[in-house]
Amino acid sequence: MTTATDLLGRYAGAMVQVFGTPQLVLASGHGCWVTDVDGNRYLDLLSGIAVNALGHGHPALVQAVAKQAESAIHVSNFFTSEPAIALAERILDIAAAPSGSGVFFANSGTEATEAAIKLSRRTGRTRIVALEGSFHGRSTGALALTHKAAYREPFEPLIPEVVFVPPNDAEALRAAVDDTTAALFVEPIQGEAGVRELSTNYLRLARELTSAHGVLLVVDEIQTGIGRTGDWFAHQSSGIVPDAMTLAKGLGGGVPIGALVTFGPDVTALLTAGQHGTTFGGNPLACAAGLAVLDTIERDHLLEHVRTVGALLDDVGVPGVKGTRGRGLLRALELDGTPAAAAMAAARDAGFIVNAVTPTALRLAPPLVISADELRGFLDALPAILESARAMGEAVS
Ligand SMILES: *Cc1c(COP(=O)(O)O)cnc(C)c1O
């Protein structure tokens, strides 16, 4: 039998090492559970970083993909297909987008960001305001709007005229957004920064200021969208209507797809024939997957479900956890002294996949279909996990 040790040896000899050494070699998944090549089972509380919205092997997604693969996987953008049109219509519907809105399909989050940056250039302005702690992707355009210096600096110079302001700081935003600004990019909840929410008032101020100065308000819902927070999109609870929205991660339930949504005819008309494109974007296979995800969320009332089970994480009441952040099934547990990396390793040893999103916090982003019992299983195991993480820390120090 091929073991994880064998495979990781081959990995080291065959891959560019941008991800370091992977924690596990996974073989299969079913529901909210995954199995590695050595036969160990784990409760997946991360879903491939908020991607496997329906968990693993969901029959609706498997059947939709298999059926679509039999008829057409790819047609190119010289042509179109019904799944692409139907998915665009569905997205506009759940986004409550006004008539004249539109969708551009890409294949990833960073490509959705690229499309939004190009959209913003069509305003005739070039200055972009983004937030400290932001993550908008790794391609060189998106990277210019991604705050973390360690990601950005090795690749500078990037596109110029990007300014970062601290999130939830009204004065800083007022000072940064003016008549020379092309776009303001915000994540309603900054996932990569440690699941940090923008306040409703701040999002409303962002809408007010951008409207007053003719600036595009771009909402990055790549991690927070598609039901993750208990709404279709996280910005909806604040009542704002953005000018553009980016999507990816959960949209295809694991099949790569990204999207830029433009709100209203004026914004939609900014990009005209020939100004943007992609070979794979909007292929019928990925779009059929997206339709299956959205249909299943609706049919199985998963938005309500996310709010109900997510409430178990409002206040976990576990010693060693200082507090929680986030909404629905996008959460961070802020640890009281236990290094998050040690807690992640201890959780893995105990059969749970979580993510050390900051040095002091664990991120949870389980499949939207996770049951209350599965989530309680983790919370029940958490005190022992944190204890063994602390013991590991003492052993190495
Ligand atoms: C993951 C993510 C991206 C980038 O998506 P990729 O598919 O990895 O390119 C951009 N923005 C946010 C908020 C994300 O979480």
Image (cartoon, rainbow, N blue to C red):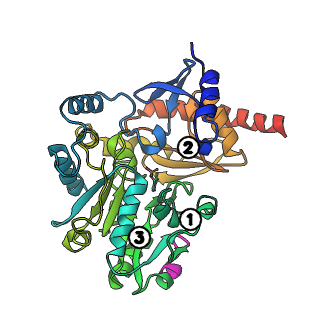
Q: Which mark is residue 205?
A: none
Tell me the kind of residue under disc 3.
Leu
Ranked by sequence position, the earlier of labels 2 and 1 is: 1
Q: Nearer the viewer, mark 2 or mark 1?
A: 1
What crowding class fits label 3: few (fewer than 14 Cα within 10 Å), some (14-19), or many (20 or more)? many
Ranked by sequence position, the earlier of labels 3 and 2 is: 3
Residue 178: x and y, percent? Answer: 43, 85
Specify the quadrant that holds the C terminus: top right
Residue furthest to the bottom: 179
Q: Which mark is residue 316?
A: 2
Residue 87: x and y, percent? Answer: 21, 48
Label 3 to label 1: alpha-carbon separation: 19 Å
User: Which residue lies under the disc numbered 3?
Assistant: 203
What crowding class fits label 2: few (fewer than 14 Cα within 10 Å), some (14-19), or many (20 or more)? some
Residue 125 inside the magenta-drawn segment? no
Left or right: residue 244 compared with residue 318: left
User: Which residue lies under the disc numbered 1?
Assistant: 147
Label 3 to label 2: alpha-carbon separation: 28 Å
In the rendered view, tell whether residue 237 sits above or below residue 169.
Answer: above
Tell me the kind of residue under disc 1.
His
In the rendered view, tell whether residue 212 sits above or below residue 258.
Answer: below
